[in-house]
Amino acid sequence: MAAMEHIEHKDLVREEFTRQANDYATAPAIRDADHLRKLVEIVAPPRDARVLEVATGPGHVAMAFAQVCREVVGIDLTDAPLAIAENMRAERGITNVSFQKGDVESRLPFKDHEFDVVVCRFAVHHFAEPRKVVAEMARVCRADGLVAIEDLIASEQPERAAYYNEFERLRDTSHTSALAMSELIKMMGDAGLEIVRFTSHGYRTPVSQWIKAANASPERAAKALAMVERDAVEDLSGARPARIDGEMYFTYRIAMLVTRKLR
């Protein structure tokens, strides 16, 4: 992506996540306590770990790790979700978490090998340069430390992945691309990381809630809905839309990869 396009995309991310901040922070898939617990369990961080969460948003993941780790730092590009995160931290009286603003697609403001665990959830599909972010996550992780990513994944078939990503971008202009599992694995391997654990699952969501959460314009929302409706008939993306009791649903495919930094 050209430099100017990269800058413009970051502006889109700031705009979308400023506008979506409250809805995103309260979305069931984002704040679900059981899901957060499972994420921490699969990462299995040492209790004395210093943890970095990249693209922390409203801080739910950072605060979940704070329950079992020594210290957690959350970094994000956008002020609005960071304000929500800080308010929740203060309300809960959590003292081993801090939040800061920063551009995760530039050089992270941390030294090499500074953290024991580096984690990123539901953000890779918003990055213009995900390979650079993964490399930075690996850089700030110590040797033999853990780097974990949870994100949406697309089909291994390029035309099906393209269809899925097109209706996601219609709904949310900050969406770049959900990667195929194989792409995400290769990206992490190229950064000097070795997979130690992985899992994947589906998360069924109502299409009306999915559109509302992003506050898409009526025109974009209508186009996205039309694509989902067509997908329900023709099976074009792997999201498997279906109407249940009058409500249209589709299924997010989600992968969780835990890797070890080799050196």
Image (spheres, helix red, strand yellow):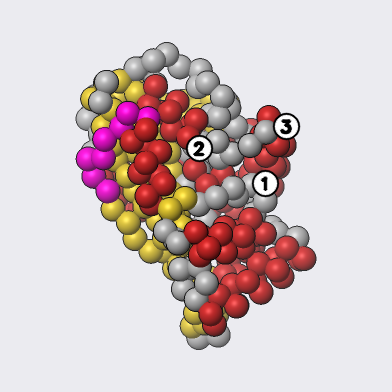
Residue contact between numbered discs 2 and 3, judged by CB atoms under 8 Å: no
Mark sitting earlier along the chain (1/2)? 1
Whether 17 is among the magenta residues is no
Image location (x, y in percent) of residue 85: 52, 37
Mark sitting earlier along the chain (3/1)? 3
Image location (x, y in percent) of residue 106: 56, 24
Residue ID at (60%, 49%)? 175
Q: Can residue 95 be seen in this snapshot?
A: no
Alpha carbons under labels 1 and 2: distance apart: 18 Å
Q: Which mark is residue 4?
A: 3
Above or below: residue 214 compared with residue 231: above
**Crowd band around label 3 with a 10 angstrom C-alpha radius: few (<14), some (14–19), many (20+):** few
**Crowd band around label 1 with a 10 angstrom C-alpha radius: few (<14), some (14–19), many (20+):** some
Name the residue tied to disc 2.
Answer: 130
| Residue type at numbered disc 3 | Met
| Residue type at numbered disc 2 | Pro
Image location (x, y in percent) of residue 258: 29, 40
Name the residue tied to disc 1.
Answer: 16
Which quadrant would the N terminus be assigned to in this image?
top right
The magenta span reads 191-198
